[in-house]
Amino acid sequence: MRDAFRAWGHQADVYALELDEDLRDDGRPWSAWRPGGPADAVILHYALPSPLTQALQSHRGKRALIHHNITPPEFFVGYDPEMVRICTIGRAELVSLRDHVDLALGDSEFNRQELEAAGFARTGVLPIYLDFARYAETPGPVLQRDLSDGRTNVLFVGRVTPNKRHEDLIRMAAYWKRFISPDLRLVLVGKLPRRRAYFDALQSLLYEQGFTPWEVVFTGHLEHRDLLASYRAADLFVSMSEHEGFGVPLVEAMVMDVPVLAYRAGAVPGTLGGAGVVFDEKRLDEVAEMGALLCAEGPLRRAVLARQARRREHFAPAAVEATLRRYVDSL
């Protein structure tokens, strides 16, 4: 977005409370931010409560919000009381912004409807911007080699949190290993939680199901090239998540030509837009059998990939930039 604004002749910068190491060249620390004047516009990407909320409220110029959703706190009950508290505050804080913005955008129709329900007057949809060119870069050679040993690689990408339902992925993999093929690897890419209760429960489940660490792999956070390697080696992307505000990995899988099999929850059906294969009930044996069919070269896999190739154009940079410009011009 920043680069698009600059290309249109605006002075634009990204400010963040925290910057991951691989993003330090793409943003500036929040401590460097200074309030602008009436001619300036501020866009807040909202996902958690923070001091940025007050900064938006006090800004004298145009104000816009992009809602990335907040996980309902009930998912963390019994696992992480701090996240229960943060998500509860975050959802209340979102409502407090409804009278302080000129435009409230959701990155999905699901999120736009949340904004509307919260009382925001003017809402719209602006999909998350993905630079498709970055997905054509060379993948990390070591991880790609390690995953290219002849096993069927079933991939999921997402933070290890209770709403993502990694336990359902593990149980599906257990059926697959027992009744379809033992040559299965479940690759779980995503940041591990600081509080270990949920992750420890998953480790206990792996032990109960008799998996080895090389049959179910938790990679933790991956740098971009290794993320590409995980997609490049994947035969199938499966999501059991029960709450998604957008689902960036769904789009990434479509860009990387990996067939998607996903549970219908939150923004998932809207993001896929008729592409991939979406299921309504977690009959894990049937999900595994469908997954095996999608892994096999044949008409079904080709048809799914063709639909995904058409759908991903909805998220192409040019399409998202055109939508963004319409909203900017309307402020």
Image (cartoon, rainbow, N blue to C red):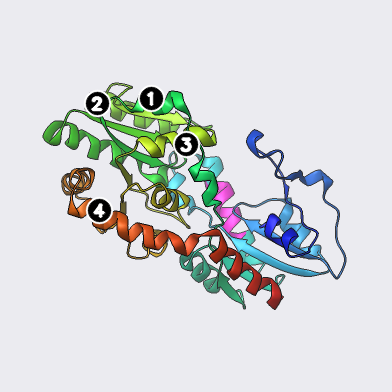
- Sequence-wise, the earlier of marks 2 and 4 is 2
Picture residue at 44% right of the left edge, 44% below the top: 77
The disc placed on residue 273 is none
Residue 20 percent across, percent down from the top left: 64, 37
What is the CA distance from the residue labelled 2 to the residue labelled 3?
29 Å
What type is the residue that disc 1 sits on? Arg
Decide: few, some or many residues near mark 2? Use Cα within 10 Å; few <14, some 14-19, many ≥20: few
**Which numbered mark, 1 or 2, is in the foreground of this view?**
1
What is the CA distance from the residue labelled 1 to the residue labelled 3?
13 Å
What type is the residue that disc 2 sits on? Glu
The disc placed on residue 145 is 1
- Sequence-wise, the earlier of marks 4 and 1 is 1
Q: Name the chief secondary structure element in magenta.
A: helix
Quadrant (top left, top right, bottom left, bottom right) of the N terminus: bottom right
CB atoms at circles 2 and 4 under 8 Å apart?
no
Picture residue at 44% right of the left edge, 32% below the top: 197
What is the CA distance from the residue labelled 1 to the residue labelled 2?
29 Å
Task: Give the residue pinned by disc 2.
Answer: 208
Task: Give the residue pinned by disc 4.
Answer: 302
Picture residue at 56% right of the left edge, 73% below the top: 124
Q: Which residues are magenta?
A: 84-92
What type is the residue that disc 3 sits on? Leu
Residue 27 percent across, percent down from the top left: 72, 45
Q: Is residue 76 left or right of residue 48?
A: left
**Which numbered mark, 2 or 4, is in the foreground of this view?**
4
- Sequence-wise, the earlier of marks 1 and 3 is 1
Q: Does any portion of residue 141 appear in the rendered image?
A: yes
- Sequence-wise, the earlier of marks 2 and 3 is 2
CB atoms at circles 3 and 4 under 8 Å apart?
no
**Which numbered mark, 3 or 4, is in the foreground of this view?**
4
Task: Give the residue pinned by disc 3.
Answer: 227
Decide: few, some or many residues near mark 4? Use Cα within 10 Å; few <14, some 14-19, many ≥20: some
